[in-house]
Image: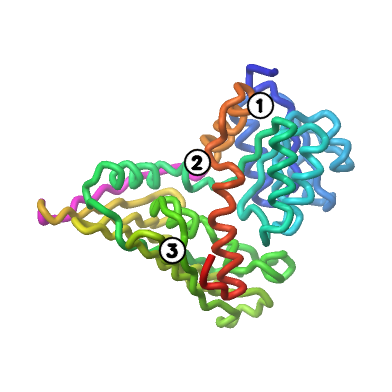
Amino acid sequence: MINNWKKLKVLIAGCGSIGRRHARVLFSMGVEDIMIYDKNQEQAEQLKKDLPDVISVDTFEKGLSSADVTFILTPTKLHIPMAIQAVKAGCHVFIEKPLSVSTDGITELEDLAGKAGKKIMVGLCFRYHEGVKKVRQILDSGRISRLVSIRALVGEHFPDVHPEYKSLYYARYSGAFELMHDLDLAIWFAGQNVKNVYSVYGSYSDIGIEAPDIAEVLIRFEDRCIATVHMDFFQSPRRRYLELIGVEGVIILEFASWDQYTISVYNRKCGKWESETCKSNRDEMFRDEDRDFLISVAHDKPVFCDIREGCKSLRVIEAAQKNITDI
């Protein structure tokens, strides 16, 4: 066992925007041995230009042969097959969200990892965001008493964020469901099993993608709590907004940008709003997430966002896409 997490040999599979971010973050934290792989050589070469000290490998198999951990940051459809391959090769695995496009293969991956004693972590990075953690603390403190309703909204203009958007897999099959952090947070804050899912989704705007550019999801939990989640790929400006409504008050988390957030809390007994606006660094939640994963591997500790946590939002997305109301 390698007790120093910085000495773990890391393979990054997928050198797109999220792969570049994880590579940069891991390098900045002092991880000493980073390999990269992408079947798109141009993407791998660009990452290598940004971080000359990383080692580029020609095949996924070659990287797996010497890696301790693998970060799978490829298109969503490839996550489970690549994770199974990595576990069979003896690697611990980090899988970027969403865990997959369906629950197919999840049980096989979980069984393989369990038998091999390998960690699987799902990249639900917003659970590590300092603003989200503060909201969690406020909710757990009881300031708004029992949570009854959750309202989440996230939207961005896909063509502005990715000018080459029509060539990305998002545009072909996952669309707005890729913006599922807020759906995951709704489930996490509710802290209950999901009873029913209702949805409306499709390509409604003028950006011209095949996949859904908007999704509205309504979730009913087992014990007197509901959530509504809006995700879209066409609104401008980019917005992210979360509202938790309890029997004794309200908590609102709003992001003005990636680097600024505001938390507002109303308690019925106090009868007034209290607000706090803070600066943040987007990379910090990735640093905390990656460090947590590597420490879990090095010291054989449970991971925070394991397969079962990743499956909670995946099952809701799968039900929403198939219009299955009872899960």
> 63 or 140, which lies in front?
140
> 315 or 60, which lies in front?
315
Residue that label 1 marks:
31
**Please, what secondary structure does the residue beneath circle 3 have?**
strand
Total marks placed: 3
Q: Amino acid at mark 3?
A: Arg
Q: Amino acid at mark 2?
A: Met
Q: At which x and y percent is residue 153? A: 43, 65
Residue that label 3 marks:
239
Instruction: Measure the alpha-carbon separation of dots 3 and 2.
Output: 18 Å
Relative vertical location of residue 256 with respect to residue 108 in this rendering, above or below: below
Kindly identify the residue that appears in the image at 57 percent across and 75 percent down.
323
**Please, what secondary structure does the residue beneath circle 1 have?**
loop
Relative vertical location of residue 47 with respect to residue 185 in this rendering, above or below: above
Q: Are marks 1 and 2 in contact (CB under 8 Å)?
A: no
- Tell whether 270 sits left or right of 119: left
Instruction: Measure the alpha-carbon separation of dots 1 and 2.
Output: 17 Å
Kindly identify the residue that appears in the image at 88 percent across and 42 percent down.
59
Kindly identify the residue that appears in the image at 54 percent across and 57 percent down.
313
Residue that label 2 marks:
285
Kindly identify the residue that appears in the image at 81 percent across and 37 percent down.
88
* Nearest to N terminus: mark 3 or mark 2: 3
Quadrant of res 141: top left
**Please, what secondary structure does the residue beneath circle 2 have?**
helix
Q: Which residues make up the magenta segment?
A: 270-282
